Amino acid sequence: MDSPLNRRRLLFGAGALGAGALITACTGNSADSDSDAPTAAIVGAAGGDNDKPGQAVTIGFSAPAADHGWIGAITSNARAQADKYSDVTLESVEGSNDVNQQISQVETLISKKVNALVILPYDGKALTEVGIKAMEAGIQVINLDRVFSSPRGARAWIGGDNYGMGAAAGRYIAEQMKAKGVQNPVIAEIQGIANLPLTQDRSRGFREALAAAGFKVSNRVSAEFTVESGQQVTSNLLQAARKLDAVWNHDDDQGIGVLAAIDQAKRSEFLMVGGAGSRNAMELIKADSGVLKATVTYPPSMASSAIRLARLVAQGKGMSDLVEREIPASITLASATVTKENVDDYLPLGFAS
Amino acid sequence: MSEQSGATVSAQAVGPTGPGLIHRLRSTEIRNLGLIAVLTVLAVVGAVTSENFLTSDNLRNILVSSSVIGVVTVGATFVIIGGGIDLSVGALVALASVWATTVATQSYGPWMMVLCALLVGAGAGLVNGLLIAYGRLVPFIVTLAMLVSARGLAAKLSDNRTQIVTQDSIKQIARADLVGVPVMVLVLAVVAAIGWALLNRTTFGRRTFAIGGNAEAARLAGIDVRRTTAQLYMLSGTCCGIAAVMMMARTTTGSSTHGGLFELDAIAAVIIGGTLLTGGRGTLIGSILGVLVFTMITNIFILNNLATEVQNIAKGLIIVGAVLLQRRATRENLP
């Protein structure tokens, strides 16, 4: 009676070991022999007197957790840019989506007495107080992307233009519709997380640019910046709208799901515009084999620029192209429209999803 | 009348026996008919409010959107009938999808990806099962811990990136039709059929009902409660692996963000389907009907351009309504 039980246990154990070995062999994720371009961080061309090594400075860096491609790109860009400068030591803390944790991390950086601090707050309002605290401690704070609720919280703000992004998408679609001679086009909009101020700014820009051309948004759905939600809301949108002329998707990360749904529904009668500017989207635009014709950028290279600004202000320099000796207090980066014509210029700036 | 209710009571306690079987079937079928009535009402509402509802495209869309969560629900039904609960199903789908889309796995080809997803799901389910059955830990706690750690592991393996599926045959699963039916729906049908057969026509199914109804009595009757419990969680995990493959096909990616809140959707569908949360009674058909109810509601809301927030409120109200109706029906059957 023991023998078959032992044999069964032996077989089960061997099977479990074999399965375990099999799946352990499947965890490798390095793309060293990949034909895909490696996930190179965006550090911009070196040049000009400002890039010559100067006084040694320490820059602190705090951003939310890298749970989607755009934030991941922010973090890797900042690190890579800091590496390029021999006079910069980067003190970066673990990314966190918990506001309390981010506040404590910034306080740690303050007590380490860094010269400058680059912060992308998970929530601008919640992190304003600790920004003010850093400024009062003599640390130059660069506020990245999500803006503090008080200008006392930072020496300078640098970020993207959400309204401009929507407006660029609206203008492109309006031009295309006019060029094709479409009267009353059916235009759909796939938002990200609906209750964020940035989403609302983008939608407003889109709506107003379309209105200037006499068009309006017929269908609006919202996803959550994830691939799964993008796929789900798009497959439902395609059911609700039997014929579409144009679609604007706010974010290229969720755009992977959007394109999957379009492919599965076998629809192709419309043109699609993406948002944020991922490398994946740009490659699809270049190949021009599907509905994706353009994307409007919201570049995570702003993190590299923020590090550069932090270094300049810590070393007491200004921006070389400007006459003034101090860096500006607020820089809004423009949103570029990437189409097949200019995609080669922007491909190096595309981020990996 | 009392004979019928008495037979129903005894059927609940130990599992179906001779004459009780017919009466038990009748009450189960009544519940399923109730669900079909709900589906019909929803279909009427849908057809009236939107001219796109009754098109074959839209009905096909409803079935396809039910397929992933439907497969997960089949596994969850087994676990809940057996008296347990599995909160980690969503996280296991994410983990399996990430593991199966790493560069290494994809380099071995699509069959390896499928095998990997199934093994990861089964393996994690087995860990759940062993801890619950042999470690004597509470299922809620164990699966909660698995939920958190599986997502963390998925995030670590994928380095928080979205992993794109490069093997076209996997993507084909979501695009292709076989004999006019989408492959995703066929997979759901096959999984549901096997699940039904396992639950209602094998001793494994009988043992599941017995353990869920009264574990101590089952043990005294000679059933290896611990081994069957472990097998139940492994089954649930395997279903999550299958769902992960379908998810990879549908979204063309593997990501640690997949399967968000799947556990709540699955448990809600199982409850609506008539399975008792305490275990010992339930049907697989009911669970599938429960899934269809929810996807149909979502579809009607989308077709009518209504906000997601209202959808979620409606879902909550329906769950409460369904449970209240169940309790009334149960009370009517008892003396």
Image (spheres, coloured by chain):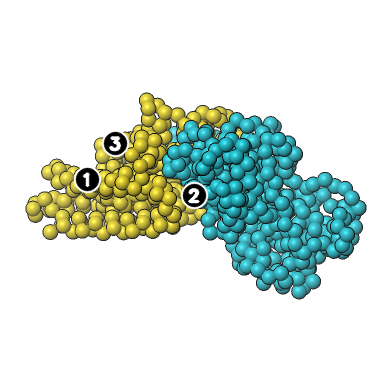
| Residue at x 89% of width, y 50% of height | A48
Of B279 and A140, nearer the camera is A140
Chain identity of mark 3: B
Neighbourhood count class around disc 2 (C-alpha, 10 Å): few under 14, some 14–19, many 20 upward:
many
Query: Are both tags, 2 and 1, on one chain?
Result: no
- Marks 2/3: CA distance? 40 Å
| Residue at x 36% of width, y 35% of height | B56
Residue, disc 1: B33
Residue, disc 2: A221
Q: Secondary structure at mark 1?
A: helix
Q: Secondary structure at mark 3?
A: helix
- Marks 1/3: CA distance? 20 Å
| Residue at x 51% of width, y 28% of height | B169
Of B200 and B73, nearer the camera is B73
Residue, disc 3: B197
| Residue at x 46% of width, y 55% of height | B144
Chain identity of mark 2: A
Left or right: A44 as drawn, with respect to A5 = right
Check contact, mark 2 vs mark 3: CB within 8 A. Answer: no
Q: Colour of chain B?
A: yellow
Query: Are both tags, 1 and 3, on one chain?
Result: yes
- For discs 1 and 3, the disc positioned in front in the rendered view: 1
Who's cyan, chain-wise?
Answer: A
Residue B222 in the image, given as x and y percentages of width and height: 26, 46
Query: Are both tags, 2 and 3, on one chain?
Result: no
Res A215 seen here: yes
Farthest residue, direction top: B179
